[in-house]
Image (cartoon, helix red, strand yellow):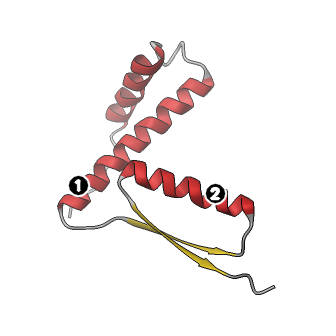
Amino acid sequence: MRENVFNKKVFIKSVKDHLKANYRKTIESASQQELYQAVSAAVKDRVANEVKELNAKGVDVCLAVILVGADPASQVYVANKKKACEQLGIISKEYLLESMR
């Protein structure tokens, strides 16, 4: 079994690469928002790569969501999770249940 080890140097390089490519900035000159977006992109890249590795081994990565009722905020949340899964190569399944109220 492969150890999933976090390599800080590789991650920081990925963040720096995103900042340079998207904002033409360094970590020191980036705004907080730009830095957050670069970190988010680096995390998504890492997750997408790990999902591809698992898929190559025949393992399907899946997120299942159970939505009870018709709360609009919950529907938006679930839609955003579904979109994120699609971007990362993760299968998403949604189960809708009626509220008991």
Report the front residue among 83 and 32: 83
| Secondary structure beneath label 2 | helix
Left or right relative to 77: residue 69: right
Residue 64 locus on image (x, y percent): 48, 71
**Mark 2 or mark 1, whichever is nearer to me:** 2
Residue underneath mark 1: 53
- Pick whichever of labels 2 and 1 is earlier in the sequence: 1
| Quadrant of the frame with the N terminus | bottom left
Above or below residue 99? Residue 36 is above
Tell me the kind of residue under disc 2: Tyr
- Residue shown at 55% from the left, 17% from the top: 30
Residue 4 locus on image (x, y percent): 30, 54
Crowding at label 2, few (<14), some or many (≥20) Cα neighbours within 10 Å? Answer: few
The numbered disc on residue 22 is: none
Crowding at label 1, few (<14), some or many (≥20) Cα neighbours within 10 Å? Answer: few
Residue underneath mark 2: 77
